[in-house]
Amino acid sequence: MVGVDSTVVNVALPDIRHDLGFSPTGLSWVLNAYTLAFGGLLLLGGRIGDLAGRRRTLTAGVLLFAGSSLLGGLAGEGGWLLAARAAQGAGAALIAPSTLALITTGFPEGPRRHHALGVYSSMAGIGASVGLLVGGMLTSWASWRWSLLINVPIGVGVALALPRFVPETPRHAGRFDAAGALTGTAGTTSLVYAFVRVSEDGWSDTRALLGFTAAAALLAGFCLVEARAGQPVMPLRLFADRDRTGGYLGVLLLPAGMFGAFYFLTLFTQQVLDYSPLRAGVAFLPMTLAMFTVVRLVPRLLARLGAKPVLLTGMGLLVAAAGWLWRLEPGDGYAAGLLGPLLLLGTGIGLSFMPLNATILARVAPGDAGAASGLLQTLQWLGGTVGLAVLVTVYGTATRHATGAPAAVLTTGAARAFGAGALIALTALVVSTLVIRGGRTRQQA
């Protein structure tokens, strides 16, 4: 649900603008309202699960997500839809860390957990790419409203199934860290907002600069609060493990380099190759199939080789995919220009993110599983937001200096953005090589 909803609305934006009368600037907030709420509340959502019970928190998040999807699908004006999208983001912030924490505490460290994390990683990655296909189908065949309403029966079904199939986790006693929750949520929300403004209006935007200033002050205060809190929202002891710290750096840097690629690939397929929304969604299926195939093999590779070799191989493939796209030309068709990089992206994502998740969640105390999961997903979401802002800036600079037909200008800008993404992914590869020690866990051995 969370993966699909991160992209399902994208291809429906023109129809939403026509029906609800959004301005071009206002339309971007159909995506940004979800991004802000989700990214800003992930830390808080993870800690709520630790203290209130993770199945209970997951159920509340699913019901909030389904209810806000219903309100969004029935929206009669723009403000109503934006409020529903923000509520969806809040529900997702309860769902995502609780799901990952339930996997961490429900499966012992080793092959069984790696298999469960493989299924989780494939569902999250496939959901994002399938969202483009589902959004194109629903928008073309029915209405953009069904891209939201489809969540309602799924959410109700999940909420009814949870008590039967998922045991509740123990509550962990302690006072809720209200000061940490307030400063952490406000700080991450300010930071995400600032980068959203940068992606729209550039680095000189006054509101973006104010957002960065507020984020720096709030996050500095957050770190001071967490160092003294008895039950912190983000326990600083999570960074005492070198491998986990390296994993956190990886989930920050890798999405920063790669997630923006999907934005520019969508632009290229629809505006250069002249694909319909549905055909553009179908174009991503080779990546989805490669990802799904690879994640089924990763648990065996982890048991045999350990996390680090698998992770570095996946990161290397992602660097190669971005470098290939760096050479994209306006005359390149789908087979020559996109098919190879998409297969590399799917394989690289399948080999990279599950070992990162396994490295971060190894040896986490049960009471910290929600906080560790919330921080993982906060950094991953923040990395994608930061990376998109950087790549959009590179794209804008390149297109302002490019000449020729619109398709050639767009391709030039997209290729430069892919090049910047390749450099960020290469940085993630170098950091992971130097910081993560790797090796098999005692349970694996």
Image (cartoon, rainbow, N blue to C red):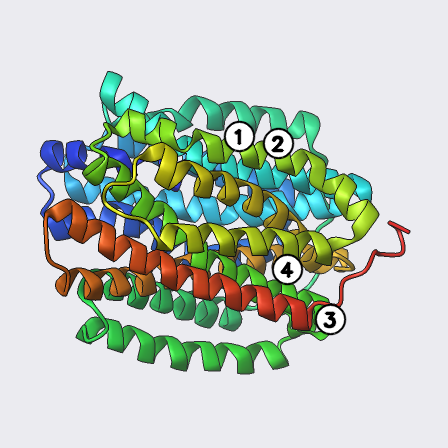
Mark 1 residue element = helix
Q: Find out whether the residues at labels 2 and 1 contact each other: C-beta distance under 8 Å.
A: yes
Q: Check disc 3 and report the residue beneath it.
A: 241
Comparing 127 with 22, the one in front is 127
Q: Residue at x 42, y 48 (%)?
A: 90
Q: Residue at x 41, y 33 (%)?
A: 284
- Amino acid found under the numbered disc labelled 3: Asp
Q: Residue at x 25, y 66 (%)?
A: 198
Task: Please provide percent x and percent y for residue 341.
Answer: 45, 43
- Amino acid found under the numbered disc labelled 2: Thr
* Label 1 vs label 4, nearer the camera: 1
Q: Is residue 33 above or below residue 186?
A: above
- How far apart are the alpha carbons under marks 1 and 4? 29 Å
In-image side of 107 versus 141 (left or right): right
Say which mark, if any, is on residue 293: 2
Say which mark, if any, is on residue 372: 4
Label 1 crowding class (10 Å Cα cut-off): few <14, some 14-19, many 20+? some
* Label 4 vs label 3, nearer the camera: 3
Q: Is residue 79 above or below residue 237?
A: above
- How far apart are the alpha carbons under marks 2 and 1? 6 Å
Mark 4 residue element = helix
Comparing 133 with 266, the one in front is 266
- How far apart are the alpha carbons under marks 4 and 3? 12 Å
Q: Find out whether the residues at labels 1 and 3 contact each other: C-beta distance under 8 Å.
A: no
